[in-house]
Image (cartoon, rainbow, N blue to C red):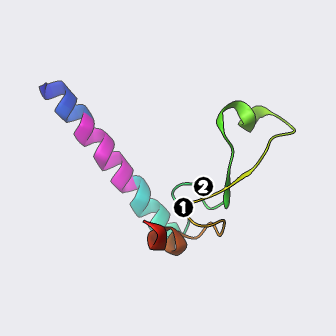
Amino acid sequence: MGIMNVFGDWIEKRNERRIELCKSQGICPECQGKGFNLLGTEVYMVNSSYYHCAGCNGSGSYFDWVKTI
């Protein structure tokens, strides 16, 4: 079980660093500041559907993301 704890700690620290980077840039960690998300393989399709980012309510702002968590 020790390896699982090490792996879990690594993932947690990586996520914390990613959120801190997004905070310093002022962008939403869920949509990377775009205000929308693409699901699955739609990233590679020309006629893809955009889904409103629920984390920041479509603004792309870190501060709007903080209000929703």
Q: Is residue 58 left or right of residue 63?
A: right
Q: What's the distance in space between the residues labelled 2 and 1, CA to CA?
A: 8 Å
Taking the spot 30% from the left edge, 46% from the top edge, the residue there is 12
SS for dot 2:
loop
Answer with mark 2 or mark 1, whichever residue precedes in sequence: 2
- Image quarter for residue 11? top left
Q: Which residue is mark 1?
A: 55
Do the residues bearing badges 2 and 1 touch, measured as CB atoms within 8 Å? yes
Q: Quadrant of residue 7?
A: top left
User: x%, y% of residue 62?
Assistant: 52, 69
Q: Residue at x 57, y 66 (%)?
A: 56
Residue most toward the right?
Answer: 47
Q: Amino acid at mark 1?
A: Gly
Q: Which mark is residue 31?
A: 2
Q: Main secondary structure of the magenta part?
A: helix
User: Residue 68, relative to residue 10: is it above or below?
Assistant: below
Residue 10 image position (x, y, % from top left): 28, 40
* Numbered range of the magenta stretch: 8-17
Report the side of 58 relative to 5 (left or right): right
Residue drawn at x 56%, y 66% is 27
Q: Is residue 11 magenta?
A: yes
Left or right of 15? Residue 42 is right
Q: Residues within 10 Å of mark 1 (few under 14, many from 20)?
A: many
Q: Secondary structure at mark 1?
A: loop
Q: Nearer the viewer, residue 68 or 9?
A: 68
Question: Residue at horizontal 60%, vertical 55%?
Answer: 31
The count of marks equals 2
Mark 2: amino acid:
Cys
Name the mark nearer the viewer: 2 or 1.
1
Q: Identify the image quadrant of residue 18.
A: bottom left
